[in-house]
Amino acid sequence: MTELTQWFGEHQQWIMLAIALLAFFESLALVGIVIPGVALLFAAAVAAGSASINLWGVLVAGFLGAILGDGLSFLLGRYSHEKVVQLPPFNKHPEWITKGEDFFQKYGIASIVIGRFIGPIRPVMPLVAGMLEMPAIRFYSINILSALAWSPFYLLPGYFIGTAAETQQLVQQQHFLLLAGILFISWITSACVIFYQKRLHNDKQRINTAFFLFVISTIFIICIYLLTKNGYLTSIDAWGLKTFTALHLPFLDVFFVAITLLGYWLPMAIWATAITLSLVLQRHFTLAGIWISATFVGQFSISWLKNATAIPRPSVVQQPPTSFSFPSGHTAITIVFMGTLLLLAKNRLSPQTYKWGIFASTLICVLVACSRLYLGVHWISDIVAGACVGIAILALFYGLLQQKNIQRYTQKSATPKSLLIATIVGILCAYIFAVIPSFEVNKAHYQLLESTTTTLPVTMHNE
């Protein structure tokens, strides 16, 4: 593998083509099973990062190769499946096709998405989808959407490692602690939510819990504001700012900027619109009203609190956001979005899926919150207050959904699959039309000032 990476380094003009071809063959039935595609893609991505090849070009190359490989596999299954199953390795391992068919029958459309990320069945699922005569339009739609997620999932780790090695800025112990902290906070939070929800057996208990969470969150917001305004949290906030800004690496800059830009108003509006259209098309008008209401309440509350508290942001980046700092709007609105989606789909989720849904949602919220601290545009107190705002709004709508006169209109929850697809489509459209076109400009805004590492020029929030 080292020799291959070295060869790529000596022949940089071939890296993009190699990534496209490797993604193609990794996705192609027959070939993808026998070649170590993941390892080869990793080596090519490391070389691309070391050569500072444009990241978006690398991702596009992987994306195109993946959809072409899966697309050809689908056509082989549709029109030549009798010949394909007689070729090696399928003639010696017919159980691979059988397992693929069972997986497809069990998970349906989701099997195409899931299969992309599971090595043993990855090259088989498009072939099986063709053999079982899945509608071509449906397959290619899912194929394209899942490839948009597959390309960064497989290529970004190698690319970032290559970038870090080239700039001689290696991952240190603090970065592993950051990763461990993100995972631990996500796990412990989701575990507490699941543990407590198991003890809510009727509507009265749920309404009381919602009221309790709303009141406690509101009290926390007020206390954090008063402590911040009077300077009691200044040392903690300054320590947090210094700690997170010391973690900067080029590949982490790209990652956290890509995460944080999703929280801007236009990407979030695109995501919210996709969910709204999905609910309206399913004729879940009450749920659509709740979703729209939660979105507007969240945005209005954040805007009002920022203007009312008027706490300045840290001044450690080239061009900080123009709005005030308290509370973190990104943190609050992400919690509102992820929590409301879970509430809308809860009744149709199995207990196990619901647990994973809570963990995944919590992880996304923690990543967004960390992105604001890492980029140096929020204090720790802002993040905690933002989390409290998000929880308070969620508690409000959770209690609303427990009311008898509301429940009769919401007895049939939205299908989790439709909300998941709408979320994927919404986020992808947000990145394609809002995030990527302005990515480099916004990335430059978040660059640390040259004097930050030595003098840490911050505008303290109690001034």
Image (spheres, grey):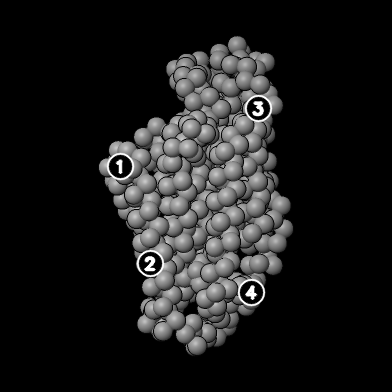
Instruction: Residue at 50%, 53% (x, y): give it.
Output: 336
Badge 3 or badge 2: first in the primary sequence:
3
User: Element under label 2?
Assistant: helix
Q: Which mark is residue 200?
A: 1
State the CA–CA distance, disc 2 to disc 1: 23 Å
Residue hosting label 4: 322
Q: Is residue 438 left or right of residue 297?
A: right
Sequence-first disc among 4 and 1: 1
User: Is residue 416 shown left or right of residue 445?
Assistant: left
Provide the secondary structure element on which disc 1 rests.
loop
Q: Is residue 375 left or right of residue 229?
A: right
Mark 3 element type: helix
Q: Which mark is residue 138?
A: 3
Residue 269 drawn at (x, y percent): 65, 53
Can you give x and y, in whole percent of width and height, for residue 147 in the image? 61, 40
Image position of 213 with respect to 166: above or below? above
Identify the amino acid type marked 2. Answer: Ile
Residue 326 position, x and y percent, is 51, 72
Mark 3 touches mark 2? (CB < 8 Å): no
Query: Seen from this angle, which residue lies furthest top?
Result: 82
